[in-house]
Every structure is written in C-alpha cells, then in structure tokens.
C-alpha cells in the first residue's frame, strides 16, 4: 500500500500573494506493522513544496485588520520536490519565532490588495 502523507506548514520567502507549505511522505519500516507494533519506525526522504494563494480569512482572534488564510488551489507548475537532508541543510539557522511570523494589520491589508 502507498505510504501515508504527513503535512506540516512551514513558511518560506515567496511573492507577497503566495505562501509555501511542505508535504513530507512518510514510509513506515517493516512489512507487517501489526506484528511489529512496538518497533514502528517512520522515515522521511523528500519534501514537496507548494505555493498557495493568501486570501481573506475568518480567524476570530484577529483584533485589528483582516485575518489571512491560505486558499485551496495551488500552482502545480510551481511545485518543487527536494531531498529532506538537502532542505534541512539549506534552512539551518533560519527558524523563526512565533513573534517573527506575526504580521501587522497594514501588512496584511497590503498582501490582500496584491
């Protein structure tokens, strides 16, 4: 059977009206997971990076300005597949804090204007 997909979101620099998320494919070691219940292992080999449009959202805790969300459609032509180790090496030391990801109301308005 095909391996299950795990999704995690990770913002990467991109055009203002687009954001990127990553999808990692998980492969469980062993052919009979039921029998090896306590010895399960998951490994990741590559990431698929997709670009989604930024749209007006509906988050109730957005105190000022418009909340933002990701749209459902993505551009398959802009999708990039990259080796996980290569990706981790390239992004080393670039992790952002929660505060770094917060956008001011004026910035969110400009993103929606395009």
Image (spheres, grey):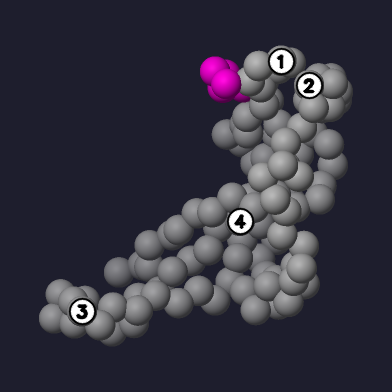
Task: Examine the image and state in which quarter residue 70 appears.
Answer: top right
58 in the magenta segment: yes
**Residue 38, numbered circle:** 3
Query: Marks 4 and 2, how far apart in space?
Result: 26 Å
**Residue 94, image quadrant:** bottom right
Q: Which mark is residue 15?
A: none
Query: What is the C-alpha distance between the residues marked 3 and 1?
Result: 49 Å
**Residue at the spot of label 2:** 105
Query: Badge 4 is on which residue?
Result: 22
Mark 4 or 3, closer to the camera:
3
The part of the chain drawn in magenta is 57-61
Find residue 79 and report its horizontal and vertical position in percent.
Answer: 69, 55
Q: Secondary structure at mark 4?
A: strand
Few, some or many residues within 10 Å of mark 2 (<14, 14–19, 20+): some
Q: Please tell me which of labels 3 and 1 falls first in the chain.
A: 3
| Residue that mark 1 sits on | 64
Disc 3 to disc 2: CB gap under 8 Å:
no
**In-image side of 99 versus 58 (left or right):** right
């Amino acid at each position: 059977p095909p391996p299950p997909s795990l999704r995690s979101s990770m913002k990467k620099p991109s055009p203002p009206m687009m954001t990127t998320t990553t999808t990692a494919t998980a492969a469980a070691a062993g052919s009979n997971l039921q029998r090896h219940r306590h010895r399960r292992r998951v490994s990741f080999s590559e990431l698929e990076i997709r670009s989604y449009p930024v749209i007006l959202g509906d988050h109730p805790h957005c105190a000022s300005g418009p909340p933002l969300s990701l749209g459902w459609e993505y551009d398959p032509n802009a999708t990039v597949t990259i080796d996980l180790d290569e990706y981790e090496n390239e992004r080393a030391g670039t992790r952002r804090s929660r505060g770094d990801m917060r956008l001011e109301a004026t910035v969110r308005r400009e993103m929606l204007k395009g």
